[in-house]
Amino acid sequence: MINTDLLPADKDPMGAAIADYFRHHKADRLRVLSSLFDEDEIPVRELFRTKRQMPLLERTALERATGKILDVGAGSGCHSLALQEAGKEVHAIDISPLSVETMKLRGVRNVTQTNLFNEQFADSYDTILMLMNGSGIIGKLEHLPHFFRRMKLLLRPGGRILMDSSDLRYLFEEEDGSIVIDLAGNYYGEVDFRMQYKDIKGDSFDWLYIDFQTLSLYAAENGFKAELIKEGSHYDYLASLSIQASPQSS
Ligand code: SAH
């Protein structure tokens, strides 16, 4: 089942890091643990990137975002602020209480603490933005049908999702270029993460990295059309997903 909850403040390490950085202009290490990768950290400063500091895929998404925009998992509000500055209409949502509070303090005008998958949350948008490996929020491949159903409810006619993701195949590449993937196992882009900031430990959560071909297949099966807008420099890409016009009956 897909998670539809909010985060309580005592299980919100990323939000705590964001709130700290906003207040003190510095933060401790935001640690990221997972069973697939070595322990890593997210530089908290990068969560506050300005438009000029954003990777090209993100800047492209911001430029292509039109009409009423939903910024899903908006974090510190970096994309929402850039969109507001460009005179665009944006609604930021996040499950993190501390991120939502910080976004308000930073001047994001329209912010709601809600889970994308909570059915009480109902509105409609021309563009749904999911950035910084935005597919992650979907969690697992098996949640994609649920995700696309939800998107149909939230998208206006002619609207679309702009999402970035990465193909994790490079983790499984041998020196000779061949790829060793256990086909009997889970899809190779399904990762579990846990974050920690100071003594605040978050619960473990599922995070989906998806290659463009697999995304396109699931999209087509669920009434969406996937388009590759731009590829990044390291197996990452920006995709657009729009509702497939149903064939006209004659
Ligand atoms: N988009 C921001 C933050 C990315 S981190 C950026 O690019 O900097 C992912 C964010 O998504 C976190 O702030 C997390 O709290 C939020 N999130 C995770 N699952 C969510 C869900 N189901 N609904 C809404 N927000 C979610």
Image (tube, helix red, strand yellow):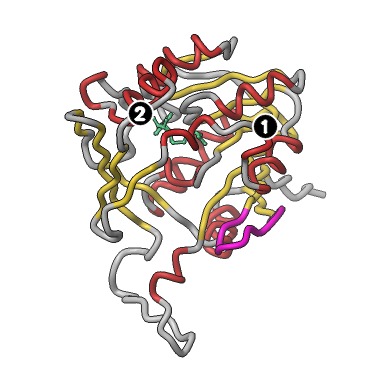
Numbered circles on residues, count: 2
* Picture quadrant where residue 12 is located: top left
153 up-or-down from 33: above or below:
above
Relative to 147, say whether 91 is above or below.
above
The foreground one among 249 and 124 is 124
18 displayed left or right of 49: left
Residue plotted at (76% across, 18% down): 87
Residue at the outermost right position: 250
Specify the farthest residue to the left. Answer: 199
Instruction: Tell me the quadrant of the picture where the N terminus can be found.
Output: top left
Of pointers 2 and 1, the one earlier in the residue sequence: 2
| Picture quarter with ligand 1 | top left
Quickly name the residue at label 1.
127
Reply yes or no: does residue 234 show up in magenta: yes
Residue type pointed to by label 2: Ala
> Measured from the top left, where is residue 212 in percent x and y?
58, 61
Residue drawn at 31 percent across, 26 percent down: 5
Residue on which the image places disc 2: 27
Across and down, in percent, residue 217 comes to 56, 61
Residue 119 visible in the snapshot: no
Kindly identify the residue that appears in the image at 77 percent across and 48 percent down: 249
Residue at mark 1: C-beta within 8 A of ligand 1: no
Q: In this view, does 161 lie above or below 68?
A: below
Please say whether residue 90 is one of the residues in the magenta stretch: no
User: Which residues are the magenta region?
Assistant: 228-237
Given contact means CB atoms under 8 Å apart, are the residues at marks 2 and 1 in contact? Answer: no
Q: Nearer the viewer, residue 242 or 177?
A: 177
